[in-house]
Amino acid sequence: MILHVALFRWQPGVTDDDVARLVAALEEMARGIPEIRGYRCGANLRLRPSPADFAVVALVDDEAGLSAYLDAPSHARVYSDHLTAMVADRQASQLTVPDGVAL
């Protein structure tokens, strides 16, 4: 399995309402992509120092599943409708998760 992690830092002026609309759009998108096995997104709780304002994690079976998620038209729509105007910086990484390991 592959865990995809994306961290975002917002442009100045991004509001809590902008973030709430983004979360709703991302959660709807994730429900429509069958290759996604697990999905979470939300504002950084800031329990430890970090420049990230927001995080997304998605669990998929394999590289094909990751491509199906990231290349989905609904993913592109979330970017064009929300993220393009919000993002100052984005970082992403993918990790191997052995089968049977609980997250």
Image (cartoon, helix red, strand yellow):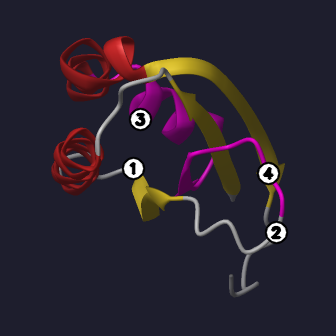
Q: Earlier in the sequence, mark 4 or mark 1?
A: 1
Q: Secondary structure at mark 4?
A: loop
Image x and y of residue 1, in percent? 69, 59
Image x and y of residue 12, in percent? 46, 22
Q: Earlier in the sequence, mark 3 or mark 2?
A: 2
- Mark 3 closeness class: few <14, some 14–19, many ≥20 residues within 10 Å: many
- Taking the magenta stretch, the answer to whether it contains residue 88 is no
On screen, 94 above or below 39?
above
Q: Tell which of 39 and 62 is nearer to you.
A: 39
State the residue position of label 4: 50
Q: In 3D space, how far apart are the residues under numbered discs 1 and 3 (Cα atoms)? A: 7 Å
Q: In 3D space, how far apart are the residues under numbered discs 3 and 4 (Cα atoms)? A: 26 Å
- Kindly identify which numbered label has been placed on residue 35: 1
Quarter location, residue 78: top left
- Taking the magenta stretch, the answer to whether it contains residue 69 is yes
Q: Secondary structure at mark 1?
A: loop
Q: Earlier in the sequence, mark 1 or mark 3?
A: 1
Image x and y of residue 95, in percent? 81, 51
Q: In 3D space, how far apart are the residues under numbered discs 4 and 1 (Cα atoms)? A: 30 Å
- Kindly identify which numbered label has been placed on residue 48: 2
Q: State if disc 4 and disc 2 touch (CB < 8 Å).
A: yes
